[in-house]
Image (spheres, rainbow, N blue to C red):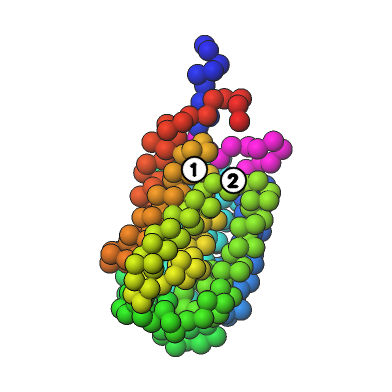
Amino acid sequence: MDSANLIVSMSPHIRGRISVERMMLITISALIPTAVAGLYYFGIKGLMIMVLSVLTAVVVESVIEWLTHRQLTFKDYHAVLMGFLFALILPSSVPWWIPVIGSGVAVILGKMVFGGLGTYPFNPVLVSWVVLKLSWGERMSLFFSPHSTDQVLTPLMAIKEDPALFYDYELMDLFVGTQAGAVGTVCGLALVIGGIVLVSTKLIRWHIPVSFLIGIALVATILHGINADMNPPALFHLITGGTLMTAFFLAPEPVTSPVTPVGMLSFGFLAGVLTMIIRLWGAHPDGSFYAILIMNAATPLFNNLKPRLYGRR
């Protein structure tokens, strides 16, 4: 067999001495700043969501593996990471059973039904989020203001009703977390810190986060130039909603994203453009989670744009 025809595929890959367990622990550590911010802004309710979500993911995965006589894999911390991520994209207003059902669906429908880690085609966390969004849309769309239980609109929900409302927001306030949103998406600063950790440790490459943000910024800048009164500037879109959580933690998920540089750049950029299309003309005010799921379906195509030969950079 000609070794030049071998193409790297299937993820996650062990990079040097970094095991799967270490990859998961580094990612969990990178989520700590945004989790702390979520606890600061939403208090005990945010903590309850995180604990229930993580415990459910670990228990459900272990029970399925025990019933099917498979080796228990909870020590690789992937279930912990899934539960942690799922909790951070939930509103603080959800009842206790939402994170329980959601984590269970992520493990069963998003991961185990396809064979486990490394075999699923769609990001399990986002699969579960969509299931809950379709099943309990009202509960998943109810957000509290930080440090209170006052029901308010998120910035993206507000401009969906009236685009001119973006003038009511200070960009720096949005970036540090004084906005309504999911537990782990309100503080852009914390997410950027976590993203820097992932990139600096080479756990993710820069291609998807950067191209995703460029896709969003490009569309937002063009539309803002056409009509500044009706279209918020690019920075507004970059620091609101699930943009930064998606850019650093959901889009570059190693199993469901491309592995080639060209594929990653194409994946990220088109996901960013699609996010803006959904935000501006779709029914959902954000769109970033839907965009990644759609792009996950095209990951094999992106990998074939310019396959990487085995053993070459």
Side of 72 where 241 appears, left or right: left
Residue lying furthest top: 1
Quadrant housing residue 120: top left
In this view, 256 is above or below 59: above
State the residue position of label 2: 205
Q: Position of residue 151 (x, y in %)?
A: 41, 85
Q: What are the residue bounds of the magenta stretch? A: 10-21
User: Residue sitting at 36 percent across and 44 percent down?
Assistant: 297
Report the Cα–Cα distance between label 1 and label 2. Answer: 9 Å
Mark 1: amino acid: Met
Side of 172 where 166 appears, left or right: left
| Quadrant assignment for the C terminus | top right
User: Residue sitting at 59 percent across and 37 percent down?
Assistant: 13
Side of 53 where 153 appears, left or right: left
**Quick one: 57 or 248, which is closer to the camera?**
248
State the residue position of label 1: 264
Q: Main secondary structure of the magenta part?
A: loop
Secondary element type, mark 1: helix
Q: Are marks 1 and 2 in contact (CB under 8 Å)?
A: yes
In this orientation, does residue 248 appear?
yes
Q: Position of residue 163 (x, y in %)?
A: 34, 77
Secondary element type, mark 2: loop
Q: Position of residue 164 (x, y in %)?
A: 36, 80
